[in-house]
Image (cartoon, rainbow, N blue to C red):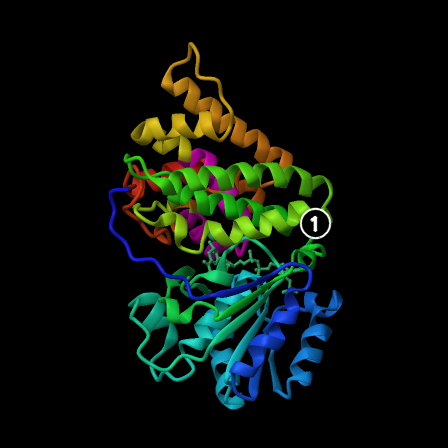
């Protein structure tokens, strides 16, 4: 471990079939006014809404609601949420849903008591929070983003065609998160597998960097083994509790800041995926799966030894009598086979991207510098074209 770091994670987790009982322990810590934030209605259809309302009432809370948070939450909706939280004089923002609802709640949380424009402050200038935050708690219903235990908040500006994430400090992390794997059973298969790929991508963004012998890489290989194993079971039997609970737990650990410790990180797959998302509003995990293999083939020569290690340690490639390139390519082929088995998008055409959109998507792609190769605009264009 050559890097220096500090590590702390303040989110308290309640995990398992009875996890919602944790709300009874948490709610008394906050004031009367709770703003319940949720999406387009899945929590009403599957009964989670009723259970949460019952507990809020039993704890004597004044319940206010902000519903209709869309996948890939927008800046327009954020402004509405900020106003609702102000009107409610919210003491707690309770996000019930997936990463979109949780991310959105964090963006509201840091903006309620702020006079500046939230988009300019956090998603253009990347300023630190300078006003009092309203605490966030979450009840997670969709697995993948890790938003339940991190400071990430990704907002889409539809007019500017930009989808930008701000990683906030630990005081913005959810104070608590309720993780009941059974709550994810009603997810459509498309969303389940998109979430599974989001998890894999989070791990790989942090794995493909650096050359030192780093414990974080070993932890990530363990998480990947568990993810590949459980995903194959879940895709056949979505109500297999063991598999769904493992996937939920891996998602949290894939992006709760632990595995990046002592490393630089890449995040170019996410930058490409977010740019695609800004132009298509496609499901986050699918935008990542559509560009991943072409991106990794492109950077492989710059981090060849790590790709060999990935092939052998994660995808079980036997290295005897093969060149490094052959081993690394076989690893990516095994990854692609698994992606097909999951039913993931394997190209951008499946997400309605056409060749004439490539220039604009390239312009919306933020360039990061922590991976094995810093891409320039031409590289980005080439990777996007290879992904069509
Ligand atoms: O809106 P409802 O009706 O609730 O339906 C949702 C939504 O349509 C549905 N859903 C969620 N739980 C369900 C369910 N349907 C049936 N049963 C359930 N139990 O699933 C759909 C997708 O939900 P969403 O929250 O959008 O998915 P996800 O958790 O993948 O979140 C995606 C957002 O998170 C951002 C993405 O960019 C995207 O905006 N990310 C956040 C990160 C972070 N905070 O660190 C990192 C990620 O890389 C990612 O960028
Ligand atoms: Zn992601």
Residue drawn at (46%, 57%), measured in percent from left and top? 278
SS at mark 1 in the image: helix
Residue in the foreground of this view, choosing between 126 and 382: 126
Q: Position of residue 56 (x, y in %)?
A: 65, 81
- Which corner quadrant of the figure contains ligand 1? bottom right
Residue in the foreground of this view, choosing between 246 and 274: 246
Q: Position of residue 267 (x, y in %)?
A: 38, 47
- Asked whether, in this view, residue 121 is left or right of residue 105, the answer is left
**Residue 318 drawn above or below residue 44:** above
From the image, tell me which residue sits under label 1.
Answer: 241
Residue drawn at (43%, 82%), measured in percent from left and top? 112
**Residue 302 drawn above or below residue 272:** above
The stretch in magenta equals 270-295
Residue in the foreground of this view, choosing between 136 and 42: 136
Dot 1, how many residues are within 10 Å of its Cα: few (below 14), some (14-19), or many (20+)?
A: some
**Residue 233 drawn above or below residue 174:** above
Residue 286 falls inside the magenta stretch = yes
């Amino acid at each position: 471990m050559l890097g220096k770091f500090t590590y702390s994670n303040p989110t308290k987790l309640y995990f398992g079939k009875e996890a919602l009982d944790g709300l009874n322990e948490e709610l008394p810590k906050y004031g009367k006014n709770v703003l319940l934030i949720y999406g387009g209605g899945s929590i009403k259809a599957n009964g989670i809404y009723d259970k949460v309302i019952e507990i809020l009432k039993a704890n004597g809370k004044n319940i206010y609601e902000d519903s209709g948070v869309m996948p890939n939450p927008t800046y327009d909706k954020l402004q509405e949420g900020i106003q609702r939280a102000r009107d409610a004089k919210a003491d707690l923002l309770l996000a019930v849903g997936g990463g979109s609802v949780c991310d959105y709640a964090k963006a509201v949380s840091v903006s309620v008591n702020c006079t500046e424009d939230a988009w300019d402050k956090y998603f253009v200038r990347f300023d630190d929070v300078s006003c009092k935050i309203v605490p966030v708690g979450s009840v997670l219903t969709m697995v993948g983003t890790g938003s339940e235990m991190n400071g990430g908040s990704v907002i889409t500006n539809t007019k500017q065609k930009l989808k930008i994430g701000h990683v906030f400090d630990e005081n913005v992390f959810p104070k608590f998160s309720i993780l009941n794997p059974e709550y994810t059973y009603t997810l459509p298969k498309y969303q389940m597998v998109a979430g599974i790929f989001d998890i894999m991508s989070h791990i790989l963004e942090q794995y493909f960097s650096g050359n030192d012998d780093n414990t974080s890489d070993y932890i990530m290989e363990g998480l990947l083994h568990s993810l590949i194993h459980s995903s194959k079971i879940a895709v056949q039997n979505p109500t297999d509790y063991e598999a769904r609970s493992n996937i939920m737990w891996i998602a949290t650990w894939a992006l709760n800041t632990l595995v990046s410790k002592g490393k630089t990180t890449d995040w170019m797959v996410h930058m490409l995926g977010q740019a695609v998302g800004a132009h298509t509003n496609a499901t986050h995990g699918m935008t990542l799966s559509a560009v991943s293999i072409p991106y990794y083939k492109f950077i492989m020569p710059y981090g060849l030894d790590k790709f060999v290690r990935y092939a052998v340690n994660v995808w079980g490639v036997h290295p005897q009598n093969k060149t490094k390139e052959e081993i690394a390519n076989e690893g990516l082929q095994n990854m692609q086979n698994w992606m097909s088995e999951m039913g993931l998008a394997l190209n951008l055409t499946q997400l309605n991207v056409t060749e004439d959109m490539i220039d604009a998507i390239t312009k919306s792609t933020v360039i990061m510098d922590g991976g094995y190769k810093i891409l320039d605009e031409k590289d980005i264009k080439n990777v996007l074209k290879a992904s069509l």
